[in-house]
């Protein structure tokens, strides 16, 4: 019977957790006496007891005016109560009666002034997913913020996991974002508690990155293919592999950031992940491809957004996701690479191969812009297991 009721709720786009009349609230009524007022009751979630609220009609003179005003007030209060509004929250969350849609719009508007465009793109996507889910529940336009309970948060994540077919890592990212969103709502007085605060993330053993380094044959096949098919994208790949740059940093480079004479790439502080200015050395073997680029306009983005997958310099910044999309949609299928060979595998491989070829680890740390040598040393563990020849010769057995 429970399953049947649940399916019926879903068919009618009803939320299974909407407040029930006479259980969570008692609808508003008019009291006509010496003092005319509209009153209603809501259950206090902390005590489980009902608390009465009333609105006086003193500013209306005639009985007709009072009754007309009361009908309007009662309809408005009952609608809000049915959508989950609870005035008890208003002491700790004065904006709890605001519409969820308005609160989400306010969040995006404020964050839009604080965050970079790449981050905002993700924020808008997550907000759109939540709004779309509420739309399916039939509550997108009228739901007030306080009605989004922990039970609804659980239901939402269950639906996302079941219907969205998301990975474990993506699922954890959902939790982190919506926890951030409702922390902001709590700070701004929309909610008194964060419904996502106690949600448990998937364990690390399930969220390990599915990414491996290239072997020598795969690298040779990749570079030969791009040499013939797309030499600009080859430079993008070499900046990741040889200069150990992140996709976002590559996407934000300008022509003026390339110093051909000194063989340096300038990573400006405003585009760096850690906000620190740095320089990357361009290896001799990479310079012929760098010299092919049109660097004549210093203010152009080195890799710009054009139609299709033309990455030549221009005025419009390319999105780092487009770099990854070209890899997944074109490079990987064309060369038969498995999903574990991702674009960012190039940086992992570059660090590993540099250390393995004898480059001092401190130099590799500088090129990768790692905060410590221990971070760079992590990549040593990604190499194929091989006994150390020097250690083979050690004789410490007495």
Image (cartoon, grey):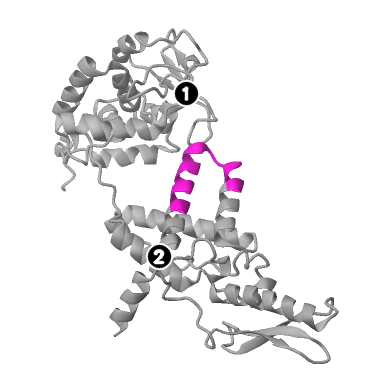
Question: Residue 48, image x and y in percent?
Answer: 56, 88
77 or 186: nearer the viewer: 77
Q: Which mark is residue 316?
A: 1
- Which residue is depicted at the point 39% across and 37% down? 373
From this view, report whether residue 61 is shown above or below residue 292. Answer: below
From this view, report whether residue 168 is shown above or below residue 210. Answer: below
SS of the residue at dot 1? loop
Question: Residue 224, image x and y in percent?
Answer: 18, 18
The quadrant holding residue 378 is top left
Q: Is residue 200 at all visible to an observer of this figure?
A: no
From this view, report whether residue 358 is shown above or below residue 211. Answer: above
162 or 211: nearer the viewer: 162
The quadrant holding residue 213 is top left
Question: Residue 179, image x and y in percent?
Answer: 49, 60
Q: Are marks 1 and 2 in contact (CB under 8 Å)?
A: no
**Residue position for label 2:** 156
Q: Residue furthest bottom?
A: 33
- Which residue is depicted at the point 40% across and 68% down? 13
The magenta-colored residue range is: 109-128
């Amino acid at each position: 019977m429970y399953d049947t009721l649940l399916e019926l709720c879903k068919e009618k786009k009803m939320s299974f957790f909407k407040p029930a009349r006479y259980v969570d609230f008692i609808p508003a009524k008019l009291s006509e006496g010496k003092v005319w007022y509209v009153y209603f009751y809501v259950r206090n979630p902390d005590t489980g007891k009902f608390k009465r609220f009333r609105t006086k009609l003193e500013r209306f003179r005639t009985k007709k005016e009072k009754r007309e005003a009361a009908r309007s007030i009662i309809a408005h209060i009952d609608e809000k109560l049915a959508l989950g509004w609870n005035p008890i929250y208003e002491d700790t969350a004065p904006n709890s009666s605001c519409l969820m849609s308005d609160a989400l719009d306010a969040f995006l508007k404020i964050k839009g002034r604080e965050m970079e465009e790449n981050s905002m793109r993700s924020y808008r996507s997550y907000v759109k997913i939540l709004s779309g889910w509420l739309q399916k529940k039939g509550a997108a336009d009228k739901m007030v913020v306080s009605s989004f309970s922990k039970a609804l948060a659980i239901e939402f994540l269950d639906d996302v996991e079941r219907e969205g077919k998301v990975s474990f890592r993506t699922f954890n990212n959902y939790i982190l974002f919506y926890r951030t969103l409702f922390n902001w709502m709590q700070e701004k007085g929309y909610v008194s508690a964060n419904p996502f605060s106690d949600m448990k993330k998937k364990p690390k053993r399930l969220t390990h990155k599915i990414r491996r380094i290239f072997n020598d044959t795969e690298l040779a096949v990749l570079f030969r293919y791009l040499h013939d098919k797309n030499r600009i994208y080859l430079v993008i790949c070499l900046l990741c592999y040889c200069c150990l740059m992140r996709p976002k940093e590559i996407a934000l480079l300008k022509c003026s950031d390339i110093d051909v004479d000194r063989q340096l790439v300038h990573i400006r502080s405003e585009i760096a992940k850690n906000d620190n200015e740095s320089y990357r050395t361009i290896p001799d073997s990479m310079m012929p491809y760098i010299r092919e680029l049109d660097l004549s306009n210093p203010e152009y983005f080195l890799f710009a957004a054009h139609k299709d997958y033309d990455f030549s310099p221009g005025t419009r910044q390319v999105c780092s996701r487009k770099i990854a999309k070209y890899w997944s949609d074109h490079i990987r299928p064309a060369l038969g690479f498995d999903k574990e060979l991702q674009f960012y595998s190039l940086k992992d491989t570059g660090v590993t191969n540099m250390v393995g070829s004898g480059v001092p680890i401190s130099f590799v740390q500088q090129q990768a812009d790692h905060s410590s040598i221990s971070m760079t040393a992590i990549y040593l563990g990604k190499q194929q297991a091989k006994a150390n020849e020097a250690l083979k010769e050690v004789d410490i057995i007495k």
